[in-house]
Image (tube, coloured by chain):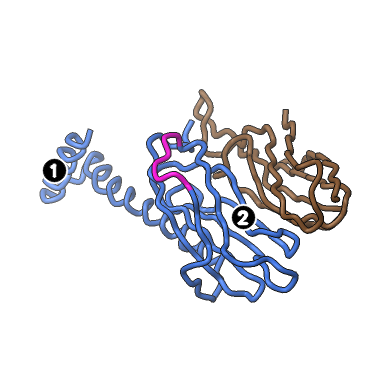
Amino acid sequence: MSEPRVKVPEKVKKGEVFEIKTLISHPMETGQRKDGDGKVIPRMIINKLVCRYNGEEVFAAELAPAISANPYLSFFTQATASGRLEFAWTDDAGRTYTHTAQLTVE
Amino acid sequence: MTKRTTQARGRASRRQVLAGAGALAIAGVIALPGGSARAQAGAGEFAAALKKTLGDAQAKDGKVAIQAPEIAENGATVPVIVRVDTPVTADSYVRRITLLADGNPNPEVAVFTLTPRSGKAEVSTRLRLAKTQNVVAVAELSDKSLWMTKKEIKVTIGGCGG
């Protein structure tokens, strides 16, 4: 559950703007649905994604229940130096899910 | 269903005229305005969310664009790309893109924080849309200027229910 998937090119040229695609398996329970007994199923969503490139925040997203289950986000960044792209998703219970990708800049 | 409601209303107003306000009459009179009040509250929530995004400033048309299907068969997952037509440099970039939806139970969709390191001001995601409605994008640039656009997406099967 909540397995993150990230697609980043292995090698990029310095200065190149490249796309980062992310997806995390999560039901994104909206808080609008009711169970069989008519009780509201509590909201439980991934409400935040932060992407850091060698420690510097390059992108962040705050998400509402209007984002689909298994939230998909893609965005861009510019290649500066080889290193680590770190991703951290946070859910409504404060749990954090992380993923790290290695990037080679030529 | 609609027919029965109309009949119930008719009966209710007759009883009112006769000043014999029974339980049915009260239910009939209260239920209908109650429904429209809820619809207005929904519009009010969208206006409030937009106001929260814009503050006291005005957004101009242009620069920001939403790419999405005209008709979404499945409202549970509607692919949307939002992009801002502006160069991204160290001193001129997009700070924030806010996505709102005016026909969902909750108008907030997402807030993306971009940086001079973004390289390109474009974000893709997938939305839940309860019904046919406008998706609104507001972009705030580093010079504090605000740019807004909206796109109507027709939804065949809503994506918020159970």
Q: Judge whether B59 appears above or below A82 on screen.
A: below
Q: Position of residue B97 (x, y in %)?
A: 60, 60
Q: Residue at x 65, y 46 (%)?
A: A74
- Of the 4 image quadrants, the one containing the N terminus of chain B is top left
Q: Which of B95 and B22 lies nearest the eye of the viewer?
A: B95
Number of numbered labels in the structure image: 2
Q: Which of A80 and B11 lies nearest the eye of the viewer?
A: A80
Which is more N-terminal, label 1 or label 2?
1
Q: Give me the C-alpha separation between circle 2 and circle 1.
A: 55 Å
- The residue that label 1 is drawn on is B10
> Which amino acid type is shown beneath numbered disc 2?
Glu
Subunit ID for the residue under disc 1:
B
- The residue that label 2 is drawn on is B122
Q: Judge whether A38 appears above or below A104 on screen.
A: above
Numbered disc 1: secondary structure = helix
Single out the residue that lies furthest toward the top: A36
Q: Residue at x 65, y 65 (%)?
A: B94
> Which amino acid type is shown beneath numbered disc 1?
Gly
Q: Residues within 10 Å of mark 2 (few under 14, many from 20)?
A: many
Q: Position of residue A70 (x, y in %)?
A: 63, 35
Q: Colour of chain B?
A: blue
Q: Position of residue A83 (x, y in %)?
A: 88, 49
Q: Quadrant of residue B55?
A: bottom right
Q: Colour of chain A?
A: brown
Q: Position of residue B24 (x, y in %)?
A: 23, 39
Q: Which of B159 and A41 lies nearest the eye of the viewer?
A: B159
Q: Residues within 10 Å of mark 1 (few under 14, many from 20)?
A: some
**Labels 2 and 1 touching (C-beta < 8 A):** no
Magenta stretch: includes residue B119: no
Subunit ID for the residue under disc 2:
B
Q: Which residues are magenta?
A: B68-74
